[in-house]
Image (cartoon, helix red, strand yellow):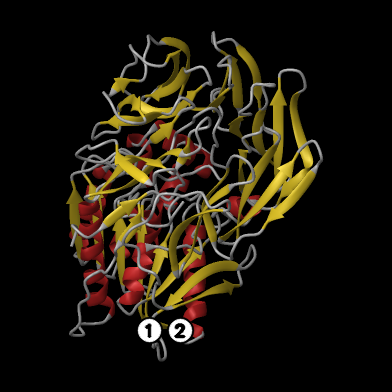
Amino acid sequence: MSRSYQVYRAALPEVCAAQPAKMVFTADADGRCEVFTWDADTRRARQVTDRPHGTLHGAIDRDARVWWFDEDDHGAGRWRFQPFEGGPDLPGLLGVPEGEPRGLAVSDGGRVAMGIGDARSTTVYLGPRGGAAREVTRVDGHATLSGITPDGRLLALGGAAGSARAVTVIADDGTPCAVLAGDGGGGRLWSLGFAPTARHAELLLVRESNDRYLLASWTPDAGLVTHSWCAFDTEITARWHPEGLSFLVRQDRHGRSTLHRVHLAERTVEPVPTPRGTLLDAAPRAGSDVHVLWTDTATPPRMVSTAGTELPPTYGIPERVPGEHRDLWTPGPDGPVHSLLSLPEGRTGAVPAVFLVHGGPADHDRDAYDGVVHSLVASGFAVVRVNYRGSTGYGPRWRRAFGEGVGLTQVADLVAVRADLVARGVVRADAAGLWGTSWGGYLVLLALGTHPDLWQAGVAVKPVADCATAYRTTTPALRALDERLFGGTPDEVPERYERSSPRRYAAAVRAPLLVAAATRDAKCPPGQVRDYLTALQLVGARHESMWLDTGHDGYEADDHVAVLRRAVVFLDRELRQGQARTTTPQTPRSDRSGDSGRERSPAPAGTGGTHTERSSGHAEGHHPQ
């Protein structure tokens, strides 16, 4: 089965600024994600990387050098590059130690800046491509290099001022030029890269303020300017147009996407027509060309160029996903809860259902193709994807609505949607299961323990199972996230961590449970999962477990298929109550971005020069990003 399973990245090819026909993209290579080049003129692809566990991060600079991050099983490694046509693999900079990738930016003249991190800090290095590196700055905690000016004299760092709400601009000698902060009322600020032209140094930003998302810009002369006339009610990201005078803004709203062309000088916002569904990626290119990666639940992703540019082909994707796909809005205390509902074809009456619980919590389910949804619907299940409170795509207030407590708020929304579907006669009350990864897996465990009578099966992949223990053994970035969510550390607010911890409710679990965990998981560490499984065993709760010899993130098809096969067979057995029918998953292709970690910025970083800090994905994950 794994031989026919393919992997891909839900992102458009990176395009060479000086030679737009030359591109770099990631695609399937015998069940692994690898980096390829694509020549739009000759319509030829060339595989650049061939690593045992795949390669996720790829980029191309203005001189058509192809970049990738050569990492080990633990996510640490170094940037390398080679000419577009092929050649020896060369180190990006000499003298840079191995570490985690936290941004790559290349100026027009071949000056390379890279962010390299470890558990304690982030260091930015600078030097000529392939030459000796020098340390520019080192900051505590997790920071992201998000851009370099075309002349290589200014750099932008997110989180470098000791706050996830700040952006710091530094000179090439490490001198701070500006610290750009939020509005002081809890609003955040994201850097989306410098203007791609050398006329002036201008940094594009997104600002959260007064329950809106606003475009902002910074220049050395004018400082930080917020463009209040250009406001959106839900999360956005933006990319510079190559001429450096306008932006393409992509908005996530209610599980779907919209596009806008923004001209700051003219103070205009023009809608860009797109089909109903989700734009997994969108990028303005030379002239009037726009590249988009479009999908909806019934249609696998398609790359489209408005100017007819030849983009890399997508092989082996089915033309249509079976089933009936619709929206559901369920009343809730902070407003209606939006769900994406997929029903099997030929349904008569209520059917068994699987609630696919997205991770994050700063993420959301989209009207987008999902290999897991495809497998489950083809197997006769209804699939429910709930954008519970805390999800992105519904505005800042929805993201901050944690009234019942961390995790418990989200579980309350799952319970409400289940009751709504049962009352409508769509879902069988005695055949409702849960399936989630990472934060989604955490919510599965919490729901099974706090509402044991409502669920008949659960699948939790790489979950948080004990909030306090996970805090003490996870990464610094996720500890910072926990402190924001809970309002402090486990020592400061122990009762909050205890109340929201699945471990507390393990003795109440009644539904059969499948837990898949990873032995080298740094984000949802294996120790706290083992403790949870021991607690289940002590009370005699029915459960199964499987262990993957991987980290939290993965690029290989074999791991995905192993979990997918086991989970679908498990749910088929438990929710159909022993019916003589077991279905093997029929998933021809899957998005590898998955639920990569327990938080994502709702306004992901764009590019300045060439910038790469893409999230790696669960081998078992879903939800294109």
* Mark 1: few/some/many CA within 10 Å (<14, 14-19, 20+): many
- Say what amino acid the circle numbered 1 marks: Val
Quarter of the image for the N terminus: give it.
bottom left
On screen, residue 551 above or below 503:
above
The extreme bottom residue here reads: 348
- Picture coordinates of residue 275 (x, y %)? 59, 64
Q: Is residue 248 left or right of residue 420?
A: right
* Mark 2: few/some/many CA within 10 Å (<14, 14-19, 20+): some
Q: Verify CB contact (< 8 Å) between mark 1 and mark 2.
A: yes
Residue drawn where x is 42% and y is 33% of the image: 59
- Picture coordinates of residue 104 (x, y %)? 45, 27
**In the rendered picture of this protein, how many numbered marks are placed on residues?**
2
Q: Secondary structure at mark 1?
A: strand
Quarter of the rendering containing residue 220? top right
Visible residue check, residue 184: no
- Picture coordinates of residue 303 (x, y %)? 47, 54
Visible residue check, residue 564: yes
Quarter of the rendering containing residue 181? top right
Residue drawn where x is 46% and y is 58% of the image: 302
Residue drawn where x is 42% and y is 61% of the image: 357
Query: Which residue, given by chain and number where applicable, does mark 2 sit on?
Result: 426
> In front here: 171 or 198?
198
Query: Which residue, given by chain and number where applicable, does mark 1 sit on?
Result: 351
Q: Is residue 160 left or right of residue 435?
A: right
Label 1 vs label 2: CA separation? 6 Å
Q: Secondary structure at mark 2?
A: loop
Sequence order check, earlier mark of 1 and 2 = 1
Q: Which label is found at residue 494?
A: none
